Each structure stands twice: as structure tokens, then as C-alpha cells.
């Protein structure tokens, strides 16, 4: 049941005195991994989510008649915005789509007014939303996340290095959670739900956000046919759908209730729908398009060159919590390292 009363506003962040310096060191460690990967491959890629499944044209339509408390910033009034969307695998390596992995979606909405947070991008007319296929992370905080990423850079030493960083009990608990979170085989990116997994502000409130697919399956209840041997079969299946028609998701938010059930600082706790019901505030539509056309390839190249950053937003939607504060440093260094394109404004020559 969607709440009719305004959500709680007593959420709070807990920032330790040494946190910013520690998070900067974490960001530098991830950038060093990015540099070592570039030395091996000859190409500077994203530190994580290196492999794109698709780069697409989309629209975000804000719904009418939202509850008063939900009318904030971008969602204040009914409107349709153009958007670019990048689907990706979570690994820092470009690998076969059959491998278990985090799957991600990054959305860049165009034509959004208001001052943005990132220095130098204050006047950009874009706003980003980033999601993964899990409603929570296995990690309580950025210390655990970076320990895992650094440990797995050398797989043969991953477990000993993780134990050294986190202790035996927490290391094995984390590995178990991570394996469960990666899940089994993914048949279609279009039928997965996606989640922010981390909180942001929503005006005076705090929320998680999510994309709920309206498509459930392809013809006869099955995904669209692709070559199972293809390393790119997830992107190919999505491309086949989009040649036939649009793909739509409900853009939903769930609001902070209390620090036990919907914590701001512990990223490992899932915000359950039974505690924090979802409210649909918009719809994201991947437009019908031919990704193999010259225009489709230009869109994909543009999306690959852009940065997608949860901190690229207005103050009304500022990211919250330790994991999000870590991303402020990490995304900035990664973006600078690979020389990301300037923010788009909708006038990009796509053909």
C-alpha cells in the first residue's frame, strides 16, 4: 500500500572525522586498478562496469497526480524528458555475458533545470540515476567494497587478501552474499528489475529508487532468440526487442521509514517493500530503435564516452550514506582518468 501521509524526515547521515581522507584513498586504489587494466589492454576503461551491453535512446515521463510529497525537482510536474541509457555488466573486465555478474543501468536525463552538485557541472542540464539488479549490496560500507575489489584483482590470492582486510568471519560471509547476489543465468536485461540499492535525498525525505519492468518475456513466454554462444547475447537480445518495439519500466521510489528497517549508512540492508512501499512517479521508455544502424552505433558510442555519476544531480536528490559518499571520489577520478565526454544537451549529432 502506498503511504498517503508524508514520509519521515528524521533520517540522518553519520560521517566519521577521518572518512573523507579514507574514501579518497579508496578512490585512488580503484583508479590504480583502472590504470593497471589499461596497461594490459591498451585502453582506458571504466574501473567497474567496463562492458556495455547497450547504449540507447529513451524517454522519462513524469506521471500526473502524484502525491504532494512526491512532487520534488524533476518530478514536480508532469513532463517527458529525453534520456540516454547505458546497460552494463559490473566487472572491471570485459567478459562473456554468461559469467555471473552485477548488471547495471545508468540513465542520463536531458533538459533538467537547476544547479547541479559536481563542481564545474553546476549549469549542466542533465541528471543521472544509476541502478543495479540487486536491491541491496553485500557490503556494509565502502571499506568492505574496496577490500573485495582489490582482493579479487588477483583471483588466486583473493580469499587470503580478503581475510587479511576483514577477518575470517566477515570475509566468508561477504563471499557467500556476493555469490548469492550475482545470481544465475540472465535471460533478458529487459525483464530484470533494477534498484539504486543505496539512498538519495528526495527533497526533505530520503529514498531508494527502482525500475520495474513492464515486459516479462518474449514470444511464447521466452526471451528473444540469440546465439547462446555469443559473448554479447544480453545486448543482442535487448537489441532484438527494441527492433520490434519499445521497452518500458516503472520508475519507483520507496521512502525512509526508520534507521533499523531502512538504514542510511548500512548498504547491506534491503529496504523491504513491506516496510517501505514503492510509489511509481515516472516511466522510463527505451524507444524502438535499431542499434545496428549508423544512428544506433553513434548513440552507443556517445553513451560509452559519457560519464554517469549518482552525484550528477541537484541538491534535492543528493546521494546519502557512506557508500554513496565514496562514489563521489571514485567516479570523479575514474571519469578524469578516461577523459569522459562533456555533458550532452540534446543537440548531439546522431544522424
Image (spheres, rainbow, N blue to C red):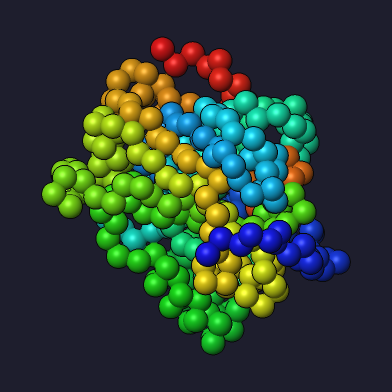
Task: Indicate left or right for 161 with 52 as reference.
Answer: right
Q: How many marks on residues?
A: 0
The front one of 197 and 98 is: 197
Task: Indicate left or right for 156 with 122 as reference.
Answer: left
On the image, the x and y values in percent for residue 198 come to 60, 60
The front one of 91 and 348 is: 348
The front one of 240 and 169 is: 240
Vertical side of 90 occupied by 139: above or below? below
Residue at 66% x, 78% y: name it.
260
Vertical side of 223 occupied by 5: above or below? below
Residue at 34% x, 61% y: name it.
100
**Quadrant location of residue 4?**
bottom right
Check the picture and name the quadrant holding the C terminus.
Answer: top left
Residue at 25% x, 42% y: name it.
237
Instruction: Name, please, the residue furthest toward the right.
Output: 17
Instruction: Name, please, the residue furthest toward the left.
Output: 220
On the image, the x and y values in percent for residue 151 come to 52, 67
Task: Indicate left or right for 304 with 23 as reference.
Answer: left
Residue at 67% x, 54% y: name it.
200
On the image, the x and y values in percent for residue 269 come to 57, 73
Res. 335 visible in picture: no
Amino acid at each position: 500500500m502506498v503511504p498517503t501521509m508524508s514520509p519521515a524526515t528524521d533520517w540522518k547521515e553519520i560521517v566519521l572525522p577521518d572518512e573523507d581522507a579514507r574514501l579518497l584513498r579508496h578512490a585512488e586504489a580503484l583508479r590504480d586498478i583502472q590504470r593497471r587494466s589499461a596497461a594490459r589492454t591498451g585502453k582506458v576503461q571504466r574501473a567497474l562496469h567496463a562492458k556495455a551491453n547497450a547504449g540507447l535512446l529513451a524517454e522519462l515521463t513524469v506521471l500526473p497526480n502524484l502525491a504532494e510529497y512526491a512532487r520534488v525537482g524533476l518530478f514536480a510536474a508532469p513532463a517527458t524528458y529525453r534520456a540516454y541509457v547505458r546497460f552494463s555488466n559490473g566487472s572491471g573486465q570485459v567478459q562473456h555475458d554468461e559469467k555471473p555478474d552485477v548488471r547495471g543501468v545508468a540513465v542520463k536525463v536531458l533538459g533538467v533545470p537547476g544547479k547541479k552538485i559536481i563542481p564545474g557541472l553546476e549549469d549542466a542540464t542533465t541528471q543521472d540515476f544509476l541502478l543495479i539488479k540487486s536491491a541491496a549490496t553485500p557490503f556494509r560500507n565502502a571499506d568492505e567494497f574496496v577490500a573485495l575489489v582489490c582482493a579479487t584483482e588477483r583471483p588466486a590470492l583473493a580469499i587470503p587478501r580478503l581475510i587479511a582486510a576483514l577477518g575470517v568471519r566477515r570475509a566468508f560471509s561477504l563471499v557467500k552474499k556476493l555469490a548469492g547476489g550475482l545470481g544465475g543465468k540472465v535471460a533478458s536485461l529487459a525483464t530484470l528489475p533494477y534498484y539504486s540499492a543505496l539512498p538519495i535525498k528526495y527533497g526533505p525525505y530520503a529514498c531508494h529508487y527502482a525500475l520495474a519492468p513492464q515486459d516479462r518475456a518474449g514470444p511464447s513466454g521466452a526471451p528473444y532468440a540469440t546465439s547462446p554462444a555469443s559473448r554479447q547475447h544480453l545486448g543482442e537480445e535487448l537489441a532484438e526487442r527494441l527492433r520490434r518495439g519499445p521497452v518500458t519500466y516503472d520508475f519507483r521510489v520507496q521512502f525512509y521509514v526508520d534507521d533499523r528497517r531502512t538504514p542510511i549508512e548500512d548498504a547491506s540492508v534491503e529496504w523491504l517493500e513491506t516496510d517501505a512501499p514503492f510509489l511509481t512517479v515516472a516511466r522510463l521508455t527505451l524507444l524502438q530503435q535499431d542499434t545496428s544502424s549508423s544512428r544506433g552505433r553513434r548513440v552507443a558510442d556517445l553513451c560509452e564516452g559519457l560519464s554517469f555519476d549518482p552525484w550528477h544531480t541537484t541538491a534535492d536528490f543528493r546521494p546519502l550514506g557512506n557508500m554513496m559518499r565514496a562514489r563521489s571520489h571514485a567516479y570523479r577520478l575514474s571519469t578524469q582518468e578516461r577523459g569522459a565526454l562533456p555533458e550532452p544537451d540534446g543537440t548531439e549529432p546522431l544522424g
